[in-house]
Amino acid sequence: MNKSEKTKSKILEEAKKLFWNYGYSNVSVRQIAKAAKVDAALIPRYYLSKLNLFKTTIGSFDWVHDFDINDDNIIDVYVGWLLASMDIKDETTVVKMLIMNSSDPVVGNFIKNINIKKMRNPILKKLKKVSPLQYDLMISAFIGISQTRKTLKMPTLTSLKKAQYEKILKHIFKGATTFKS
């Protein structure tokens, strides 16, 4: 990798951290440049605009292509994702990106649409027993418990041992995926 490619990669890496953790409109090109330790003029040179750089960070995520999700393992897959990030303090995750950017006045609609197109719809196509409503309830619980632990730092949830947290997550997700309307 030559110097130019390294610089471009560093900008993308730092932009992803900032955009996904703080939200598109809360991050400036100067902040990205400072974090990447580059001149701010390099960002439009490599990515044309702040918006294009943001979209490149979104495009760098593989969405559902690597996820072997079906009716029998969906709860275990989602529980695994939450358990894997249980103790990470400064995580850069898709969940956090969705939360921080879905209500953004500039990129909110883009984020909502790409989530439906690249995550929700492909996963629902793989499911036969879990209805769209049940899946949406599970995602609501997934985001809710994640943010309650990480952002609100509810003492009873943050003090849970991994086995306790896993049991709670499975219970909540099972309730969501077996809900009958």
Image (tube, rainbow, N blue to C red):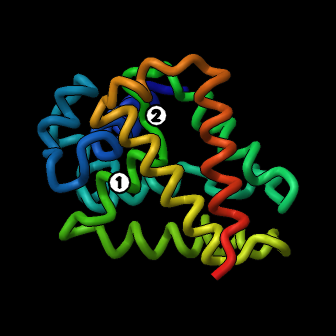
| Residue at screen point 55% across, 65% down | 137
| Residue at screen point 72% across, 73% down | 124
Total marks placed:
2
* Closer to the camera in the image, 13 or 173: 173
Q: Which residue is mark 2?
A: 5
Q: CA distance from mark 2 to mark 1?
A: 30 Å
* Closer to the camera in the image, 161 or 106: 161
| Label 1: which secondary element | helix
Q: Residues within 10 Å of mark 2 (few under 14, many from 20)?
A: few
| Residue at screen point 30% across, 58% down | 101
| Label 2: which secondary element | helix
| Residue at screen point 73% across, 45% down | 77
Residue 172, placed above or below residue 136: above
* Residue 93 image point, x, y percent: 47, 40
In this rendering, would 142 be left or right of 99?
A: right
Image quadrant containing the N terminus: top right
In this rendering, would 138 be left or right of 130?
A: left
Asked if residue 87 shows in the view, the reply is yes
Amino acid type at circle 2 is: Glu
* Residue 49 image point, x, y percent: 24, 58
Residue 162, placed above or below residue 68: above
Q: Residues within 10 Å of mark 1 (few under 14, many from 20)?
A: some
Image quadrant containing the C terminus: bottom right
Amino acid type at circle 1 is: Ile
Q: Which residue is mark 1?
A: 99
Q: Earlier in the sequence, mark 2 or mark 1?
A: 2
Q: Which label belongs to residue 39?
A: none
* Residue 178 image point, x, y percent: 72, 66
